[in-house]
Each structure stands twice: as structure tokens, then as C-alpha cells.
């Protein structure tokens, strides 16, 4: 074994987006592309002697190749030890859990999350810091700057290690431990939730369907839900992680998890349905013929959190991304705790969690989590719901309807215009920004604009400022329209339009969502000229 220094030249565009660097697999397959980025991460970290690194991914195509390369480079950089998931597999929440439990310096997550996989699909890489969470912008920006000037990287010529076999290996002076992908994570879940109560629920005939979407959550859900909680075999469907996710889009929303939605709407449907995404950090919650929005899910979990053993002491605060509905704000107000509004991106929650300012966090994009780790956590949210169902004896629909009756309902929907021309999308945003100053006080339909701005966030812990995080038009009654461009797509641009209407009166809580939001949908088109700028008369995905 020996370490060589390889000359290279920078690739343009290696700036991490909302969640790491995401590109087509074919881009990552170019010689030196992955190596340049990994060396830039290591150079940003500096001396890593004596330190531990965690490496794992969602099992998508290119995962194993990338893991072996990273191991050889970590050895060349002088890490003392790397913990890698068996088969190269670790869900994103599991990486966060393992980093924290084993006091690692950080971890590398290989995933493009909910983006499709396979040779023509997407791949991604993200660095997480010692708290287990995604690196903050100061770090990702330093990594990016490094990619712009990189001239060489260092790599060992060691042979591949056997990722399938749990055990200890060595590359150069570095120890490699192939670990059970599930064990540490499952142990943490047992500390947070009442497994006995959930076991009794299943023993009493409660039926559930968990859709692993042929992605990374399957092994975790099988081990915990079927193995430890005693749900019957077959409760977890699409349980085996496949390199191309079976050709499906591993995004747990009603459009992509159509099989689950159909099952939950059928006669004799299970009591509870759930799905997770490519890397296991997102979740969708479904009752019998009843879909729960991620924003409502966060609010319901917050309102009942003390039913779960890990949260019995109560919540310190709640944090949500700006476009997420304000349902959680009402719960925070009732509990007398703060509610923080952050830009989109889980990395913005890290400081709040580390500082003990927030306990639960959530995003409209099917992400929910807490201070148990520093990533959103799909299976955690599902277990939390199971705990609530077991402790309350109520159905999903009952819990949510009662919640609306108490707090009012925030009708909510996101309209995505995927893969549109980037120039048109940027011009749409620019023209909206120009209009902002003229909007307050204007009558739009039945609404009056109270506030129109481009969301800017000052982190209450470190004072860092993030600008241009989404254009929001807030009406005098709290209803809102938010426009922003996705930071996770790999083709053209994706325009996201977020619509929210508050309804206090329980007599109006059961309208179809798109109907309830129709006046706001018309205003969004009127103000932004979406069809004109994007050439699309309709969104590609509505969630
Ligand atoms: C990532 C981020 C989330 C964000 C989501 C959508 O999720 O971690 O915080 O809400 O992308 O971001 P955008 O609207 O910019 O596409 P994931 O699950 O893809 O890692």
C-alpha cells in the first residue's frame, strides 16, 4: 500500500446547494470529480490525525464506488478511523446518530435524497459536522472555494475492502470498521419512544403499511417495526434498497407514493400508513383515506409530544422553515414556547438545536425531526406517530381533526414547476422582487397584502445572515403565498409556490385543499406571471 498525490484541475460548479452537492451520476463518474470535492472537504477540515470519520449512503447507484474512493482518500489524509455502514449503507439520520454516538469529527453522506437514482439518475455528497448535522454555510462555502483552486489530491492505492462483512479492516495506518447499519439508530429510537405500548398496539391487531420506496429506510423499518415492535411480516413494503429505487422516484408524497395512497384509500385499509425517501430522512404520514400534510404533522407531534417518553419533559421551542405552514406557531403559542422561522434547509436548525432553543423542527418538504440528532428523521416521525396512536387510542384522522378544531386549520399546498428554463425562473423571481415595495396595502382578490418581502434570516445564535431565501406575500389575515427556487434540483430550475390559508371555523375545515386555496392560486399567477415566465400553465407536482 502506498499513498500517491494526483494532479488535478478544478471543476466549475462544485458549490453545495440546499443539501450538499447534487449532480447527475455521469457528472460524478468523470475522472477526479468526486476526488476533487472530497479533497476540498478534507483540506477545509485541516489536520485530521486521531479523528474519526463516518461514511455511508443511501445505496443508490455509484454508492459503493464512491465509498471505496473516500476510504482511500481518508487514509491518505490521516484519519485515525472510519466507521462505514455495512454495504456502504447508512440512512442520513443514521449517519447523524453514529457521528454523535461515536464522537466523530464528522461524516460524509452519499445521497441525492429523493432525486431518482440509477446510471442516468442523480448522485450527491454532503459533509456533516461533529454535531451530526449538515455543515453550515460558512463551511460549505469554504469547501466550494477550495474546489475552485484545487491542484492535487492524495489517495491510497489500497485494494477495495469487503463492505458486505461487518468487521475491522485497515487501509494504510487508518482503521476501518464496517458497522451494522441499523443497530445504533435502533438503540436511540428505543430511548425516545414507548416500544412496549406500540408492541401492544400491534399485538391488538393494529395494521400498518410502511413504504420503503425501495430505498434506504427498508432495512431500518423492517428491523424496528417488524423485528422489535412485532408488526406482521409484510408490514414494510418495497423494503429492499435498490440502486435505482426500482425506477421510482423515492420521494414520499402522495404523487410518488401512489401505491401506498391507493392502499390507504381502499376498503379494509390499514389503520396507519407511512413512507420514507431515498436516504430515510423524509416521511409521509397517512391515515385511513386521510393524508396528513407535513406542516400539520409537525404541529400535531408538538401538541402531543409529552406522550412520548423522550419528550416527557416538554419542548424548549419549535422551529420550522419559512415556507412551512404556521400551524406549529399556534401550538408554540399555546405551550408558551418560542417558534423559530428559518430558511429552507435542515442546516439552519443545527444552531437552534445545539443551543437548546428548539426541540422539534419541521419543514413542508416532508421533513420532521428533533434534537435527538441533527438531521430530519423519517422513521423517527413514524415511530412518534405510532407512539401517539398507541397512547391516545385515537385514529390519525381523529387526532388531526381534533387538532384543527382546537387550533384552526392551516390549509396548505405546494405547487412545483419542475425542470423549467433557469433563465425564465430567475427572471420571474427578479421581477417579483422589483414589485415587492408596491404590494403592501394592495387589494388582491378578497385579500389585502400586509407584507411583501424577500425573506432574510439572522441566525439568533451566531448572528450569520442569509439573504434572498424566498419571496413572501403575506395577507392581512395571515394567509400567504411564497415563491422560491429549489436548491436541490439537477436539471434547469424548479419553481416552488407555497400556498397557505388559515381557517378558524371548524364548519369550514373539510374542504378539498386545492378548492380552499383556489383564490390564492389565482393571485399567485396574477402577481408572478408564472405561465408567462415558465411556459407552464400548470404545476408538474402538487403536494
Ligand atoms: C433538502 C433539505 C431540506 C429542504 C429540501 C427541499 O431535503 O435538507 O431542508 O427542505 O431539500 O429543498 P429545495 O426546496 O431547495 O429543493 P433532502 O431530503 O433533499 O435532503
Image: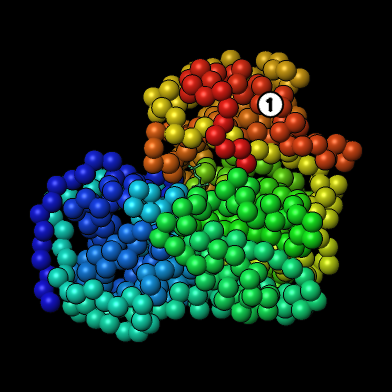
Q: Residue at x 43, y 23 (%)?
A: 424
In terms of image quadrants, where is residue 243? bottom left
Q: Residues within 10 Å of mark 1 (few under 14, many from 20)?
A: many
In terms of image quadrants, where is residue 231? bottom right
Q: Residue at x 17, y 50 (%)?
A: 150
* 29 or 41: nearer the viewer: 29
* 500 or 222: nearer the viewer: 222
Residue where numbered disc 1 is placed: 520
Residue 152 to residue 423: above or below: below
Residue 54: percent from left, percent from top: 37, 69
Residue 460: percent from left, percent from top: 53, 48
Horizontal arrangement in the rendering, residue 61 relative to residue 307 (left or right): left
For the N terminus, the quadrant is: bottom left
Residue 315: percent from left, percent from top: 68, 61
Residue 87 to residue 209: above or below: below
| Residue at the outermost bottom position | 167
Name the secondary structure under disc 1.
Answer: helix
Q: Residue at x 60, y 52 (%)?
A: 257
Q: How many marks?
A: 1
Residue 96 visible in the shown view: no
Residue 392: percent from left, percent from top: 82, 66
Horizontal arrangement in the rendering, residue 178 relative to residue 40 (left or right): right
Image coloring type: rainbow
Horizontal arrangement in the rendering, residue 183 relative to residue 142 (left or right): right
Residue 59 visible in the shown view: yes
For the C terminus, the quadrant is: top right
| Residue at the outermost right position | 507
Amino acid at each position: 500500500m502506498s499513498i500517491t498525490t494526483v494532479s488535478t484541475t478544478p471543476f466549475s460548479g462544485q458549490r453545495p446547494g440546499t443539501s450538499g452537492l447534487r449532480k447527475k451520476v455521469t457528472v460524478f463518474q468523470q475522472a477526479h470529480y468526486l476526488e476533487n470535492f472530497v479533497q476540498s472537504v478534507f483540506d477545509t477540515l485541516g489536520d485530521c490525525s486521531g479523528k474519526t470519520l463516518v461514511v455511508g449512503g443511501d445505496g443508490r447507484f455509484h454508492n459503493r464506488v464512491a465509498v471505496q474512493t473516500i476510504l482511500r482518500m481518508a487514509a491518505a489524509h490521516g484519519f485515525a478511523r472510519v466507521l462505514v455502514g455495512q454495504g456502504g449503507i447508512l440512512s442520513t439520520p443514521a449517519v447523524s446518530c453514529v457521528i454523535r454516538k461515536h464522537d466523530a469529527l464528522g461524516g460524509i453522506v452519499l445521497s441525492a435524497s429523493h432525486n431518482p437514482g440509477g446510471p442516468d439518475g442523480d448522485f450527491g455528497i454532503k459533509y456533516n459536522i461533529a454535531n451530526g448535522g449538515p455543515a453550515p454555510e460558512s463551511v460549505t462555502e469554504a469547501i466550494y472555494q477550495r474546489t475552485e483552486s484545487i491542484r492535487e489530491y492524495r489517495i491510497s492505492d489500497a485494494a477495495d475492502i469487503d463492505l458486505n462483512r461487518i468487521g475491522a479492516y485497515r487501509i494504510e495506518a487508518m482503521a476501518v470498521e464496517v458497522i451494522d447499519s441499523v443497530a445504533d439508530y435502533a438503540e436511540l429510537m428505543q430511548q425516545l419512544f414507548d416500544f412496549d405500548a406500540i408492541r401492544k398496539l400491534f399485538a391488538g391487531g393494529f395494521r400498518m403499511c410502511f413504504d420503503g420506496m425501495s430505498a434506504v429506510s427498508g432495512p431500518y423499518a423492517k428491523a424496528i417495526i417488524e423485528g422489535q415492535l412485532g408488526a406482521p411480516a409484510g408490514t414494510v413494503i418495497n423494503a429492499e434498497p435498490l440502486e435505482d429505487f426500482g425506477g421510482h422516484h423515492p420521494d414520499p408524497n402522495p404523487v410518488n407514493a401512489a401505491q401506498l395512497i391507493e392502499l390507504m384509500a381502499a376498503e379494509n385499509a390499514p389503520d396507519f400508513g407511512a413512507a420514507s425517501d431515498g436516504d430515510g430522512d423524509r416521511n409521509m404520514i397517512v391515515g385511513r383515506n386521510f393524508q396528513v400534510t407535513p406542516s400539520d404533522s409537525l404541529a400535531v407531534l408538538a401538541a402531543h409530544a409529552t406522550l412520548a417518553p423522550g419528550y416527557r419533559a416538554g419542548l424548549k421551542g419549535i422551529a420550522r422553515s419559512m415556507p412551512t405552514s404556521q400551524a406549529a406557531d399556534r401550538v408554540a403559542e399555546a405551550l408558551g414556547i418560542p417558534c423559530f422561522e428559518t430558511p429552507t434547509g435542515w442546516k439552519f436548525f443545527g444552531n437552534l438545536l445545539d443551543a437548546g432553543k428548539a426541540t422539534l423542527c419541521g419543514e413542508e418538504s416532508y421533513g420532521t425531526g428533533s434534537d435527538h440528532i441533527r438531521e430530519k428523521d423519517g422513521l423517527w416521525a413514524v415511530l412518534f406517530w405510532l407512539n401517539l396512536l398507541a397512547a391516545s387510542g385515537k385514529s390519525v384522522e381523529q387526532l388531526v381533526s381534533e387538532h384543527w378544531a382546537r387550533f384552526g386549520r392551516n390549509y396548505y399546498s405546494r405547487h412545483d414547476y419542475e425542470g423549467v428554463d433557469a433563465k425564465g425562473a430567475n427572471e420571474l423571481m427578479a421581477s417579483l422582487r422589483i414589485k415587492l415595495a408596491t404590494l403592501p396595502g394592495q387589494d388582491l382578490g378578497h385579500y389585502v397584502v400586509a407584507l411583501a418581502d424577500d425573506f432574510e434570516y439572522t441566525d439568533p445564535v451566531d448572528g450569520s445572515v442569509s439573504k434572498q431565501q424566498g419571496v413572501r406575500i403575506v395577507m392581512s389575515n395571515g394567509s400567504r403565498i411564497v415563491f422560491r427556487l429549489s436548491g436541490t434540483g439537477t436539471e434547469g430550475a424548479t419553481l416552488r409556490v407555497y400556498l397557505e390559508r388559515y381557517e378558524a371555523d371548524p364548519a369550514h375545515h373539510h374542504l378539498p385543499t386545492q378548492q380552499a386555496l383556489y383564490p390564492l392560486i389565482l393571485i399567485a399567477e396574477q402577481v408572478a406571471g408564472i405561465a408567462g415566465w415558465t411556459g407552464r400553465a400548470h404545476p408538474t407536482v402538487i403536494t
